Image (tube, rainbow, N blue to C red):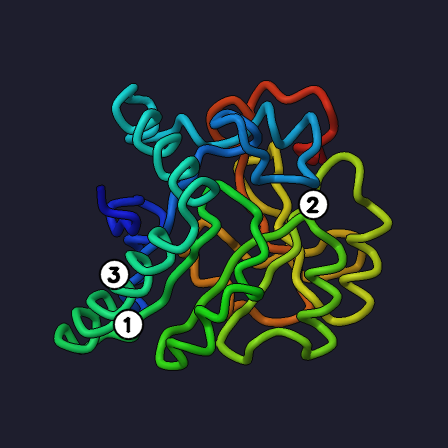
Amino acid sequence: MELLTTSNPKIAKSIAYGYLTAGLHLAPANLSGYEVCRKRSKGCTFSCLNTAGLGAFTAVQLARIAKTKFYFEDRATFMAQLVKELGSFGSKAHRQGLKPAVRLNLTSDLDWEESGIMEAFSNIQFYDYTKVTERMLKFLDGGLPPNYHLTFSRSESNGRACDLVAAKGGNIAAVFSCTELPAMYKGVPVANGDLHDLRFLDPSPCYVGLVAKGKAKSDKSGFVINL
């Protein structure tokens, strides 16, 4: 079972920007019996893109559950395999003349900064989205590895945290119901987050605007912003 994937359509867009991107899909929320999104809201749980694209296939869902159980039940072996795959991926990117980028929380929100992975692969740009305010503030205060970038993720229940992150110069991903993103939101510029997934290239501060997709189109919780 391979841990990393490069087949996610969103991260595949990075090639046009000079990056080869890989990511790790775990089973979100507590689908595996282990919680991997400890600050998830009802809205983001409902709107999760876990079942989008290849995620619609049962075999893919079972593989994500298996990876998650692997992580929690045999951490040492999991990390050894992840290190091996990251090394191979970094070499592959450089052979193709591309910069390597990795998102380990494609469908999770784990504290990868505590794993030592970023320090072991200083040649790789790591990035993630997070709903954990403490993680985001630590990033903004320079407390995370320099090759690990975080974007805060807005939900229907963390408005105050979003305001704090924006005030400190951080970026916030937000889902909008409109097909054409606004130029500004709450006095902060909005960048088009659907062009690519390389969040470390976004200007700061900004709202990273994402157009509602899948289940999010029928969200009633306030997770999706209606303008």
**Residue 85 image-quadrant placement:** bottom left
Secondary structure at badge 1 equals: loop
Which percent across, then down, holds residue 168?
79, 70
Q: Quadrant of the N terminus?
A: top left
**Which circle's residue, 1 or 2, is located before the other in the chain?**
1
- Contact between labelled residues 1 and 3, with CB atoms less than 8 Å apart: no
In-front residue for pair 225/67: 67
Amino acid type at circle 3 is Glu
Of 140 and 66, which appears nearest the observer? Answer: 66
Q: Quadrant of residue 87?
A: bottom left
Q: Position of residue 32 (x, y in %)?
A: 47, 27
Residue under pointer 1:
18
Residue wearing tag 2? 154
| Crowd tier of the residue under label 3, counting other residues whose Cα lies within 10 Å: few below 14, some 14–19, many 20 or above | some
Bin the neighbour count of mark 2 within 10 Å (Cα to Cα): few under 14, some 14-19, many 20 and up: many
Q: Mark 3 points at which residue?
A: 85
Q: Which residue is drawn at 36% across and 39% down?
A: 67
Q: Which of 110 and 10 is in front in this view?
A: 110
Amino acid type, residue under disc 1 in the picture? Gly
**Quadrant location of the C terminus?**
top right
Q: Is residue 171 left or right of residue 161?
A: left
Task: Name the disc covering residue 69, or none.
Answer: none
The x and y percentages for residue 184 are 70, 55
> In the picture provided, is 39 more to the left or to the right than 83?
right
